[in-house]
Amino acid sequence: MVAEHGLSKRRACRLVDLSRSVYEYEPDHGRDRALVDALLKLVERYPRLGFGKLFPILRREGAIWNHKRVHRVYCMLKLNIRRKGKQRLPTRNPEPLVVPNAFGQAWSMDFMSDALVCGRRFRTLNIVDDFNREVLAIEVDLNIPAQRVIRVLERISESRGLPSKIRVDNGPEFVSVALADWCERKGILLDFIEPGRPMQNSFVERFNRSFRVEILDAYLFDTLHEVREHASRWIHIYNEERPHESLGNLTPVEYRMTHSAGKASINAWH
């Protein structure tokens, strides 16, 4: 309208309902350059800090930008740290931790984590019998989902049968629908401990400490095969050679055999 019809800018803006300030605005693309550089420098130095922590640090360094401008640029650079929501769990009322009176009545399961020499993380699934602290399995792999947990339990059941109860924490593999359905079909109670209360699963937690100190922290592993070999040898030592004070200085296998022999004698007498 200004160029073709000779109208003034004021009249043209009024006709199209456009503010003169908007018409005259010329963006300064380099205006936020200093702020962008400052934010990127801070994020590189403090990669896990969010806007709420970075803004006071900027002010402590003498920056004069207000929080709205800093937040706008912070969001424009997509520096927002995604907040992981807490998983809502049902109220847990675990049974008191007691020693079962027979082998195979109750098991405990837990995961551990470590890393190979190359830095790649791996996990171990540890399963022990609460009665005599016998190690039933140490499964090692980069990832052990719920279906893998079920396969390990089925493998153990071929020689040991299945327990009436398995005590676990609230990890995603243990709270999965797949494991819950499998336990329901097998008539097994999944006894969940309260979140943040690992002492309620102390049988396997005590075992984890020994495994950590004597294997995971004692050796450097290049491959998963090495971890599995060391774990397999250590299971034999732990179950058949190492005495436990809580078992009257018997090994887990000796304690199980002694209890089985005593029970057989009582049955024969009756």
Image (spheres, helix red, strand yellow):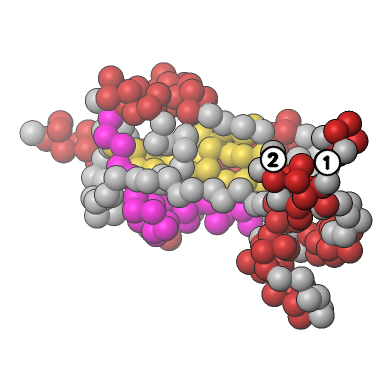
User: Which range of residues does the magenta coloring cover?
Assistant: 188-214
Q: Is residue 192 magenta?
A: yes
Secondary structure type for disc 1: loop
Tell me which residue sits at (77%, 50%) in the image: 10
* Image coords of residue 179 (percent x, y): 39, 27
Outermost residue, front side: 6
Residue 153 in which image quadrant: top left
> Which residue is found at the position 47% from the left and 34% from the top?
173
Q: Badge 2: how crowded within 10 Å, few (<14), some, or many (20+)?
A: few
Element at label 2 = helix
Q: Which residue is mark 2?
A: 15
Q: Residue drawn at (41%, 31%), measured in percent from left and top?
A: 176
Where 82 sits versus 50, above or below? above
* Residue 42 x, y percent position in the rendering: 81, 64
First-in-chain label (2 vs 1): 1
Decide: is 244 above or below 190: below
Q: Nearer the viewer, residue 62 or 120?
A: 62
Q: Amino acid at mark 1?
A: Leu
Nearest the eye: 159 or 155: 155
Q: Give the quadrant of the N terminus.
A: top right
The answer to whether marks 2 and 1 mark residues whose Cβ atoms lie closer than 8 Å is yes
Q: Which mark is residue 7?
A: 1
Q: Which amino acid type is shown beneath numbered disc 2?
A: Leu
Locate residue 11 relative to residue 204 in the image: left or right.
Answer: right
| Residue 240 at least partly seen | no
Task: Residue 92: give x, y in percent of width and height.
Answer: 28, 49
Does 11 appear in magenta? no
For this rendering, which residue is in front, 171 or 54?
54
Residue 132 spot, x, y in % from top left: 37, 46
Residue drawn at the location 81% of the way across and 75% of the way down:
63
